Every structure is written in C-alpha cells, then in structure tokens.
Amino acid sequence: MPAPPLLALRGVCKRFGAVEVLKDVDLEIHAGQVVALLGDNGAGKSTLVKVISGVAPADKGVIEWEGRAVHIRRPHDARDLGIATVHQDLALCLNLDVVGNLFLGREIRRFGFLDEMAMESRTIELLGRLTRAVPELRAPVVSLSTGQRQTVAIARSLLGDPRVLLLDEPTAALGFEQTTEILDLVDALRDRGMGVLLISHNLGDVKALADRAAVLRLGRNNGFFNVNTVSQEQIIASVTGATDNVPRRGTSYEARW
Amino acid sequence: MRRATENEQADDAAAAGGGTAVRGHTVSGALRSCGAALRRRFRAGDLGSLPIVLVLATVWIVFQCLNGNFLSPRNLSNISVDIVGTGLIAVGIVFVLLLGELDLSVGSISGLAAAVFAVLNVNNGVPEWLALILAVLTGTAAGAVQGYSCARTRVPAFVLTLAGLLTWNGVMLAVLGTNGTVNLDEHGLVADLTDYYFTNDAVAYCLAAVCAGAVFTFSYLDRRRRTAAGMPHRTLRHIALRTGAIAVVAFVSAYLLNRFQGLPLALLIFLAVVAGLDVLLRHTHYGRQVYALGGGVEAARRASLNVIGIRTAVLAVSGTMAAIGGLFLASRITSVSQTSGSGVLLLNAIAAAVIGGTSLFGGRGTTWSAVLGMLVIQSISSGMAITDTPSAAQLVITGGVLFAAVVIDALSRRSQEARGRA
Ligand SMILES: Nc1ncnc2c1ncn2[C@@H]1O[C@H](COP(=O)(O)OP(=O)(O)OP(=O)(O)O)[C@@H](O)[C@H]1O
Ligand SMILES: [Mg+2]
C-alpha cells in the first residue's frame, strides 16, 4: 500500500456570508512533491490556503494528515501539525523588526526573558540560506521593500522545520535573482522530503518546478495534471475555463445572470 | 537591499573600531559613532525621545530665565512628586496606546479606587494594607471587564471605555455615598506614599549608583555574549558613554533631591514601576505580543497569538495603573471627594503618554514616555504657577506641545511608510 499523502483535503467547502468561495475541493500534497495550485484571480486559491492554515477554517469537508482526519480550527492547530504558510498579504507586523517578526509567537527565551542574541543569530543563518541580500535586521519591517518583506515572510515559514509549506504567490514581488533563489530553495526543500503547495501565476516557474498541478476555477476543482506530461496550453485552457471539467457549474453560474 | 551588518551595533563597531571613517580611542570617536547611529534612526523616521528632551530643556530654560526659583531643589523635588499620580495613570495609557487603542475610563477608575480605599479604611475600619490591595484590585477588575468585552465585541476601546467612564464614575459616587469628602489618615500608609522622603543622603546616591551599575553590567554581559558568538555588538566606548550619561542624570538628580528633603518615596516607586514595566514590554514574551498586536491584529492572529487574552490583559494593566495612580493623587491631598479622578486628569494622562513619544497609531513607544511627558506637563504647570501666569496660557501652551507631539508622530509614521514603499 502506498504511503498516504501528507495532507489531503476531501470535499472542502467554505463560504463567506452568502458567497460560496470553495465548493467540494479536493487536494493532495505528498511528501517530497511540489503541487502547483493554479487559477484565475478570485478562483479561491488564497481562501484554500487560509482553510489549510486555520485562518479561515473549513465549513464542511475532511482534512487528513498522514491519512488521519484532523481538525484545523485555528492557526495554532496547523502550526502544531507542521504546516507553515506564506500568505499572499505576508501577514507581518509592520512595527516589529525582522527578528521580531520571524520569531513572533515562538520567541527563544533565556531565564524567562527574550534571548535577542540567539534569535538574531538564527535569523542571520536562516536569511543567509535564503538570499544573498539580507535586509537590515533591526529596522521595522514597515521600512523594508515589498520584496524584502516577502523574503522575511518566507524565512519565517521555515523557522519551525515544517513538513508542509504553503506558498501563496511567494515570488510575486521578487526580482529575477531573488525569484531564482526562492525557487532553488523550494527545490531543495522538496529534496529534503517537504511537501510544498505553490501558488503562482507564472506557468514557466510551475513547469520548471512543480510535480503536479491542481486547477481551481470559480471555487471548484477544474482538473489535476502531471506537469511533466501536460502541455502549457492544456493548463491554460483549464484555468480560463475553455475546458470546464465541471460544465454544469459553468452553465448554472451563467444561468444566474 | 543592504547587508545585515548595517544594523546599529555593527555600524557602531565599524565606525569606532577598525572602520575607515573614525579612528582613535577618543571620546569624540565614540560620540561620532553614536551620532552616526542616531542619524540613521532619524533618517528612518524614528526621532526617539530627542524632540521631547529638547522641549523639556526649552521649558526649563525659559522658566528659569523668568524666575530664578524654577530650577531650585525645592521646586524640582515638588515636580518630581507631582508627576507621580498622573504619571502612573499615563503608564497604563501607554500600554493601551501600544495596541492602537485609547482608554477613556482611567480617570473614573482612579477616582473609584480612591473612593473604595477611603470608604473601606476610614469609614469601615478595614486595615490600610488590605484596603489598598482591594482598591487596586477594583481597578484591575474594572479594566479587565472592559478589556474582555472590548475584545469579544470588537468595539473600539475608546467607545467602550467611554461607557466605562460614566459607569465607574457612577459607581464611585454610589460608593462614596452622600457625605461627599472623606479625609484620609494624615499619617497613614497612603498619606506616606507622597509624603515620605528618604532623608538619608546615602539612599539617593546608592540608588543612582545601582542604576548606573545595572545598566553597565547588563550591556557588558550582552556584549561579552555577542562577542563570543561572533555577533555584531556594541563597542566598549559606546557602553561607557551610555552608562556615563545615565550616571550623570542619576547623580545630578540625587544631588538636587538631597538638597531639599531627600529622595521622595513616590518618585522611587514611580521609577521602579516604569522600569519594571519597560522590561516587561520590551524583553518578555508578553510584551512582544502587545507590540505585535499594535502592529497588525491579523498578523498577530495568524501567528497564533491570543488576541482576546492580550486585549483583556492590557486594559487590566491600564485599570490597575489608574487605580494606583488614583491612590497617589488622593495621597497628595489626603482626601477623596466626589471630584476625585475628574477634570483634566484623563486628558493629562493621555497627553503625557503622547507628548512623551508613544504613537497614537499603535505599536511604538515605551513606558518612559509617561515620565518624560509628565515632566513636560508638570514643568509647564509649575512654571506657570511660579511666574503667576494665568491658567488660560497654561492650557494653550500644553495644548501646543501636544499638537506638536501628534504632528511629529504622524510625520515620522509617514516617513517610515514612504521609505518602505520604495
Ligand atoms: N473574507 C472574505 N469575505 C467575503 N468574500 C471573500 C473573502 N475572502 C475572499 N472572498 C472572495 O472569495 C473569492 C476568492 O478569493 P481568493 O482570495 O481566494 O482568490 P485567489 O484565487 O487567491 O485570487 P488572486 O489570484 O487574486 O489572489 C473572491 O471572489 C473574493 O471576493
Ligand atoms: Mg490569492
């Protein structure tokens, strides 16, 4: 019997008020694999990430961790399981410095007080692995550029040695060099057996990096692909809805107008 | 992006040590390296406490020119006791401001606590220490209730505490009953809070030495650990300069206080509370959460912080500090009346925190801003009294200082954001 996926979602639904943002979504993330999550703007990708990370818990559906059903109701639950997230909006505390943000909620203590030195040296080590251009560690994050903030958010997600990493458009604001650095990092993490969910609008990156791709369209699954065999056109067709795998949904959506 | 070595300590080390810019083992070298660190912070839009220190110096010089008695040991000693009551309340306000909220109920809570103490002790014969504890706990409870409901309902704290302002004021009137004013025991514990002076000169000097020694020891130990780990660290000269500056302020204050009646107990308590809470805020897990919440509720929530717990705790702290401050204010006049905790008390406490440099936008500031802000406010009011200036002018001037503080706060926030957008 093959090992169960590290993380599996089955029939996950999420609504915000009257809007049904996710409907019966399935997803599997295996150890040592990069899964690309694709979809147009507003398809529900970020919402799915929030469901998995406990920020916006699912209304319905099952989440399995190594084949065992688990409840993720708070960010805390996800973190305890070993799920780390880089949110699209980064979720950094702008007034805290880089070190403060990295260790927020899990500060290193010494005699009951914050051990700034230990945290700082760990930060230098982590950021050094990520990028050659390390930002100013003691400046408040508000004074960093968007790209620098993104690097900080990624560094923070790696802190607790997670087993599943959710990256919501992690390279959107990064320059060429930093993007390459991050993609290399994702590659290295996969080789170390981490499961990665990568949201990106850049099909080139997805083709180069991902093992599998899942497409969301209007809050529903719209196809799973093996990235090595499928053509770029097929993926685009699935993302834009030219090949709706759930045609009923498409028509009923249009019928409402 | 810039390298990590750009951070403050490293830069100082480079500047004062083997760097190309500054050489030599001179005080001026250390001064220049401190100057470089300060300039970098100013460019980053963080003026620190520099504006407020300048304002304070200006106020003192102006009043000293107008009346030679202003900087006399007697007047300075009185100012140092007068800042304590409102200053303690302002410390609580700093906590609330760090969340980006405002607590309007502190005046009423301070009056309520004083009334609880007076009625328990004077009217009902409860021992002073017990009445004192119960009065302080009343403030804690009142604050915690407000904090919890504010966190649960997500109503902004200033609205909820506006309700608190009325409610606690009503409760206080009910507690005091119809007899109006209660006079406290002139020689009791609470009266001593603002009336006791350590007449032995050695106390003030020892304390000054302990302060300077503690600052030096902690900086030195930190430096040694960092050097051992090969991390950026402060230079010895930087540490010496910092310790020296603190020692000068401490010993000059001790000397002046000793020239009058010695170190006031009230001032000692105030400084101990401020220093203790400063350590709590900036060097513990709990304090870090307060700052984080002020910097972004959603970010704090996603980092699995207990948002409701923190809100409740912060308003409980503010209620507690209000109660303690109320007892000091009652001690100053050894009586509690229906007007206790009313009037400009609330406004002064908030103004002190803001003038001292705590941001209204949350996430920036320290408890020391309560001390600095109160010093400015009390110096103005004392100077006005000494020079017989009408109180109308006093209000206008204090208002002007507050206005300037708010503008500086907003501008420094803007400049920080502008830098980030680049
Ligand atoms: N808190 C919320 N309340 C109401 N509607 C929401 C909320 N969050 C998201 N939505 C809606 O859910 C839908 C999906 O949003 P989501 O952010 O998940 O899209 P996305 O796929 O991440 O898009 P993008 O590529 O632009 O990041 C959108 O229509 C959005 O309006
Ligand atoms: Mg999104």
Image (tube, rainbow, N blue to C red):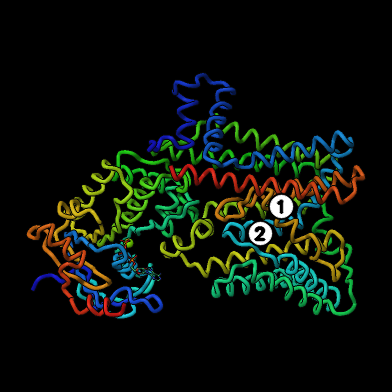
- Specify the farthest residue to the right: B388
- Position of A233 relative to B44 (above/below): below
Dot 2 or dot 1: first in sequence order is 2
Instruction: Look at 79% across and 60% down and name the residue there.
Output: B344
> In the rendered image, which residue does mark 2 sit on?
B93
Tell me the distance, in whole angstroms, between the alpha carbons under discs 2 and 1.
9 Å
Q: Is residue B128 left or right of residue B227?
A: right
Q: Which mark is residue B352?
A: 1
Q: Quadrant of ligand 2?
A: bottom left
Instruction: Look at 31% across and 77% down and name the residue there.
Output: A257
Helix, strand or loop status at disc 2: helix
In percent of width and height, residue A1 lies at 8, 74
Q: In this view of the protein, which residue sits in the foreground, B242 or B179?
A: B179
Q: Are marks 2 and 1 in contact (CB under 8 Å)?
A: yes
Q: Is residue B285 left or right of residue B143?
A: left
In percent of width and height, residue B325 lies at 74, 61
